[in-house]
Image (tube, grey):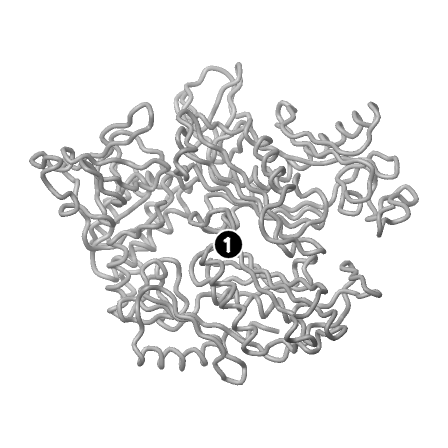
Amino acid sequence: MKVGKPERLIVNGKRLDGRDFDEMREIKIKAGVLERADGSAYVEWGGNKILAACYGPREVHPKHLVKPDKALLRCIYSMAPFSVSDRKKPGPDRRSIEISKVTRQALEPVVFTRLFPRTAIDIFIEVLQASGGTRCAGITAASVALADAGIPMQDLVPACAAGKVDGEIVLDLFDLEDNYGEGDMPVAIIPRKKEVTLLQMDGKFTREEFEKAFKLAIKGCMHVYEKQKQALKERYE
Amino acid sequence: MSTDVIAEVKRDYIISLLQQGERIDGRKFYEYRNISVETGKFEKAEGSALVKIGNTQVLVGVKLGIGEPYPDSPDMGVLTTSAELVPLASPTFEPGPPDENAIELARVVDRGIRESECIDFEKLCIVEGEKVWIVFVDIHVLDYDGNLFDASSLGAIAALLNAKFPKLEDDRIIYSEKTNQGLPIIEKPIETTFAKINNKIVLDPNLDEELVMDARLTIATTEKGEYCALQKGGSGTFSQEEILEIIDVSIEKSKELRKFLR
Amino acid sequence: MERRIVLPGELVAEGNYKLGDGVYREGNKIYSSLLGLLDEKKGFIRVIPFTRKYIPKAGDFVIGKIIDIQFASWEVDINSPYRAILNVEDFREDLKPGQVDLSKFLSIGDVIFAVVKEITPSRRIYLSMKMNNSTVLRRGRLVEVTPSKIPRVIGKKKSMLLMIKREIGIKILVGQNGRIWLDGTQDKINLAVKVLRKIEKEAHTSGLTDRVKEMIRRERDRK
């Protein structure tokens, strides 16, 4: 039994933060928040506060990584030491490295990299405050930053997680549910085609539960998509 | 990278403007850019401050932990300061462990806090020789447009003043419950940074000025008007007269910055 | 078609159009690939980005910065993801590589006004300084503007640019790569910079040339 686990995560049909099973946390997105970066976005998603920036297309350093026929897409996800309760030592850990990789692979399918051979498109995600679901918020922010930088893409990429908590399938886990629940499934999609670019899962789901969670996460993604579009439109109005 | 080599035309322009008593962004020589300080917006940190000086943005977080004191000061808490020049803040910052610039930034900010005796470390002692509070000051540079020292140190003090102890139950820290008790802060050091460009001295260099400056001087002063830390940077030199003038101006200017602290 | 702000993935048209930058086709449908302004003229459809990047085209005049010197050429930064190359023979015909120390003519940090001579399929960019206007820029002030706003700075048939030159009384060289060089008195340069920032901000509005002319006259009368 994990120390600190609340006795129940669902009480009287509601989650511990008062939400219904299929209710999302509040999301606010602002595009173009940094001066030096080519594109940037700031996302507040529940208790998460995440800053993403895009530099590119730009020269590739070190030169030996250059791809002759397309742009090199690179992504680094990082958490600030003060972003979590138990201070995180600065520097990449194994979890951050994995998240960096799946984030890149969630975004790569939409970027028209062949338009910029021999360049790099660099994405940086800094988690300033974490509260469950940072990788989805990070992908969401990075996608807006890419658009803000003028990188040509097929579509934006929204991300959202669903999971299982006290036997119930719920949408958009917050940190207590993330830590003490029975399953977590982050998903990212290309909204127009509903093609999946990120799918991970940990926990135990029956076939039925899997499908329920999967579809719920995609619904969540579409909601996030509206927020992304709104942020970009507001940038220039 | 295109920002490394500054166009000669730009350097010449900045220098000729300075000869006429003007700066490239229209400020007076000893004038700060617009400053703002927002505290407490990041709840996982025990204390936080987001400082903007012009377009430069630095976020400082304070975390508190419990650990062993140093053997030579068994009844005193511990302060540790670190800085990250995260790559999103500038096209010239690369991912990786802190480079010499990040290390210098952290150490200079740390010196200002430590030498001013800003924190009453004895009040951070829990069990002498065994358990003390550890204060982590983490500087996270978000947007680099010149003068990280002043933004970082202002942020550090603001974050320390904003910090509250988390609840301590037996030996465990319950981070999710903050008490009303702040850190024992008894001084408010302020750092001010000057750049020397071709024999002219300016306060709060912006990015363009930093790229062409010959040397830089950062001074930390206390509320009482004492000097507690100094750092010269850059490969140029200062004359003695220049240094004496700068440290006088520094005291005046630090009063302006101190107003941004609660 | 109405000029409106569009987003990547947004459906902008259906049917037979000629495609420019910033759009892509899937079957009969055409989508935007950029955050920018939708622009359609006589069956030619494109999206103008709000972005800062400059992608060079042959024939563009650019303001570049020398960043490296090779045996027979200079490497030039033109505010683009790609570095440009200026070969010795495209600088001056009478110079032969190996015979001269190139840094005597152009050294690192020097600023030049040159033309994009050629872009190879592998995106190697070659500049030339043998066109009439090409020159090395020694004094004056360099300003950077979002490259996609440069057409607005120039205006239809150079109307905006000529008006600014005339009304302020200043020398201006405009690079397609978003860099602008100004030469004149301090006051005039400051006014020109104000004007450029205004154009940058209001590039997508109409009646801008007249408003800018008014602004210049107001500032002039104040002095």
**Residue in the picture at 43% in, 36% down:** A57
Residue A165: percent from the left, percent from the top?
84, 39
**Residue in the picture at 56% in, 29% down:** A155
Would residue A236 be visible to someone looking at this image?
no
Q: Quadrant of residue C131?
A: top left
**Residue in the picture at 31% in, 81% down:** B241
Under mark 1, the amino acid is Pro
Label 1 neighbour load within 10 Å: few <14, some 14-19, many 20+: some
Residue B128: percent from the left, percent from the top?
74, 75
Which of B110/A148 is in front? B110
Tell whether A182 sits left or right of B163: right
Would residue A103 be visible to someone looking at this image?
yes
Residue A9: percent from the left, percent from the top?
87, 44
Tell whether A52 sits left or right of C96: right
Q: Which residue carries the number 1 mark?
A: B98
Tell whether B157 sits left or right of C192: right
Which of A39/B185 is in front? B185
Secondary structure state at the residue bearing disc 1: loop
Tell whether B77 sits left or right of C154: right
Residue B67: percent from the left, percent from the top?
71, 65
Label 1: chain? B
